[in-house]
Image: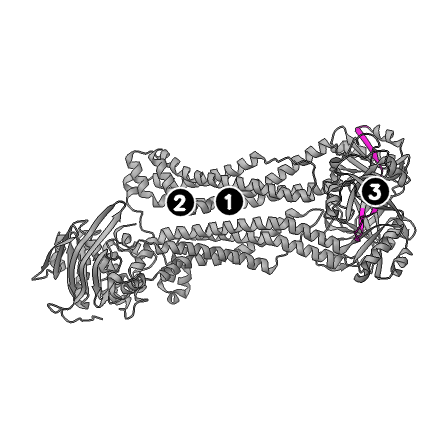
Amino acid sequence: MRALDRKLLRDLWNVRSQVLAIALVVSSGIALLVMAQGVFGSLLTTRDAYYTRYSFADVFAGAKRVPNWIEERIAAIPGVRQVQTRVVVSVSLDVPEVTDPINGRLISLPDRGRPALNDVALRRGRFLDPDRAEEALVGERFAEAHGLDLGDRLFAVINGRRQPLEIVGVALSPEFVYGIGPGELFPDPKHFGFLWMTRRHLATAFEMEGGFNDVALTLTDRSPSLERAVIVELDAILDPYGGLGAIPRADQTSNWYLQNELTQLENMGLLVPLIFIAVATFLLNVVLRRTVAVQREQIAALKALGYSNVRLGVHYVQWAVVVVALGALLGIGAGLLLAEAMLGLYMEYFRFPLLIYNVSASSILIAVGVSLVAATVGALGAVRSVVSLPPAEAMRPAAPETFRVSLFERLGARRWLSQPARMVLRNLSRRPVRAGLSIVGIAFAGAIMVVGSAMMDSMDELLEVQFNIIQRQDLSVSFFEPVERSAVHELAALSGVLQVEPTNGIAARLRNGHLQKQTAIQALAPDARLQRVVDVDYRAIRLDRPGLVLSTLLAEQLQVEPGDTLMVEIMEDGRPVREVVLTDTVDDLLGVTAYMEQESLRRLVRRDDTISGAMLKIDALAEERLFGLLKAMPAVAGVTLRSAALENIQTYMLDNMSMMMSVNLLFAVIIAFGVIYNTARISLSETSRELASLRVIGFTRGEISSILLGELGILTVASIPLGLLLGYGMIAGVMSAFESELFRLPVVVDPNTFLVSAATVLGSMAVSAWTVRRKLHELDLVAVLKTRE
Amino acid sequence: MAVQAPAAPPHPAPVFAMKGVTKVYVMGEVEVYALRGVDLELHEGEFTVLLGPSGSGKSTLLNILGGLDRPTAGRVTYREGDLSEAGERALTRYRRRHVGFVFQFYNLIPSLTARENVALVTEIAGDPLAPEDALALVGLKYRLDHFPSQMSGGEQQRVAIARAIAKRPDVLLCDEPTGALDISTGIAVLGALERVNSELGTTTAVITHNAAISAMADRVISLADGQITSDVRNATKQPAATIEW
């Protein structure tokens, strides 16, 4: 080993705690990046492999009942490669010993062979025996949620009749990676399940022999223009058979949620790590500059001995490289572990039969590269000022530093300040840029804390709004077919039902010129109490004018404003198209929805006064008995409990967010500590001579500590409000990055979040102060007398 | 101001007493003897010069007297107190109340003006001089609000002396106070020390390897190799202004 390399190692060893602190900050950024990229890359690769291997379709359509011979016409549409027709029905499920209402979907599999499209991945058991009517495959999450095993039985309630089903296999499908029931946001496998039966038996049970009600197809290529053309053709073919409007893969529910998640991961996976890496680079530069300044005389001596500027430059660049390399090593390791843990969580909610780890090496290389380049530039900048001096000059101590009376003192505060207080103020005001950067660095740590916790606050707020202000029913009932409005009275007559409000929804396609969006129009009574339309300020909006009210996001997507006219294509018999005026938009938080006053909707659809469901407020004591009564009603397709939905979402958030929160918290603490500790160590090395002089003339340890830590304290305290402000700004940015059709998170920061952030920063300061104080006690008083700067 | 101290008696009671003081530094595997059984008494109001080449142990001696270091063996007393047994807190208190230090490289706080550097000490002392008076005593009445970077080396050293004496210390310990200065500024600094010694009666010990300075002392102690080789009392003191080297 060369002498200079040995010097490098020893120098690094001497400042090892600082090196470690910076390396940890570097590693936090890289770990976050590796984690986010790893989760993103793995999910993306896994999804694509899954879709390909199990032939996920490109276009999906539902209808009332289509004769089987139509399949040939669909296959003949130019651009269609493969067609798979099916029977799909919604049922209510009865699992032994479970009282909660459970909704389910039965999907047909071909009698012989495997489906050409949307194939199922068998996890356990075997495929269906076409000769046995009661056999079913059951979705994996549903099986897990209810502890169902091969050979277990459950019942599908069909038209009030209990059809027994025997589980012979457990399966997954690319259609239900994110397996949610209608109207749900998060998978709730306790209350919703997918099951597969052979086509023959399912068709028999549902009087669908000789026909189908669901079709999926793949295209010869996935160009948007072909996709649009095929959808138009397909809609035309299915029209006479109660076609509900075809949707492209992008709008397929499970895929849509998955894509949403991937987009979020992609956005978040870059922003936050970059902040960390920027802070780490900044720290590295400050420490390096100081190190080089301290070694000024050594550098001069080395030059006098004949080392070239380039060689010395390389020496200090190596210094930076070692720190970044250490950070990168730690970061990549931690990132991979975290990615695996996060993927484990994702696998709870997004189900795949395979998992392909894929961490994009290029993004990691870029992160490490950016850190390296920034560190190198910093190192060179620091060395250049020193190596440019002739050796003889550099061997003399640097000119004494010039101080001024600080502005604060000139404003009149001077006479109240002790000399140590003046030292602190002047040290700070002498290097305002560095003091500013330190404040910003610490503020970032506080801000990251705020971001981490505020996401939780926003989620809480969202739930509060959704489940206490918007949805106030205890349970909702949906019917197979629209029923007479008089059903409201029947429901109200059930004992234990306190209040009933009808709901009505139709599937519709909203169009403005070439822009269109498939959605549901929800009908509400003007005086609805159990489900309301609520704006961003949580005020209930009264629907008392004819016309549509749209989520603001939906109106933006369709480029319409209140007063404009929209074309509404109703996805029911004959798919009539009507003109409707947009009367208002509403800044709602969940989903994108269209609302209409119920009477206006009824006139629009031109049908009898029917309802498609009802909201109930019930007596909690009568709950169990009511479920039984409701399930027994032939018209009832499903019953959804508000409390179950809320509980499910809370569990999801606890699982998912608490992990993110802990990771954020850990890294915020690392940053806070890294910045504060390094700031303290740098000012210690800069002022140790002064502080030792003070010790010699009789200042106590406590007194000199307060000078050093006073400076640190001022920086830290000054950073807190800035950190909170930055955090608020960042959370607003993050929330707008999060904005999706699924939900818009309100920017809400709980005061506790601010407190926790400030407390973390102060705590990091206390630990840094404690560590540095110990160094202060080891000051060599005698050496001070003998050495010059 | 002019606090006139009584003229020093010929044989006053000892301020410091050292008995068999030995100091050993362990440098890796080698033991270095900085002091080997030194016996010494310093008296009230005395101006003592400790003379010796580098490595003779004079700095170690001064550090032990100033409460910055403890002897390995032997006893050091300051008046009735035992410095060789004192703890960290007691030594800090001792330095704070009784000792004024002047260093070769001044060790001023660059962020404080001359007046503030002196105030640093007067703020924590019991019965200090006013900073302005201390600075006037060393001839810096007109440089009160200058920062160290705005002063020459000699001026900075005189600020350091003002800072050392402002607390009215019982002893003034100076380590090569002119070591970093040229002759004319060095003489101005020595003049300041002389004036403090005569006007305030402060017991003063100056260590130097510059033999010329010994002419202004009451007493000259020479050290070599950790031991006292001579201890001479000057019959007449030469004024600082007339010293040359």
Tag 3 secondary structure: strand
- Pointer 1 chain: A
- Pointer 3 chain: A
| Amino acid at circle 1 | Ala
In the rendered image, residue A739, in percent from the top left (x then y), is placed at 67, 48
Residue tagged by mark 3? Answer: A165
| Amino acid at circle 3 | Leu
Residue tagged by mark 2? Answer: A289
Q: Which residues are magenta?
A: A78-103
Q: What is the crowding at mark 3: few (fewer than 14 residues within 10 Å), some, or many (at least 20)?
A: many
Q: What is the crowding at mark 1: few (fewer than 14 residues within 10 Å), some, or many (at least 20)?
A: some
Look at the picture and state if A51 lies above or below A669. Answer: above
Task: Check residue A629 in the rendering and tell me which mark sits there, or answer none.
Answer: none
Inter-mark Cα distance, 1 to 3: 59 Å
Closer to us: A637 or A440: A637
Residue tagged by mark 1? Answer: A278
Quarter residue B168 falls in: bottom left
Q: Is residue A93 magenta?
A: yes
Image position of A486 (left or right of A341): right
Of callouts 1 and 2, which one flags the residue occurring earlier in the amino acid sequence?
1
Inter-mark Cα distance, 3 to 2: 74 Å
Tag 1 near tag 2, CB within 8 Å = no
| Amino acid at circle 2 | Arg
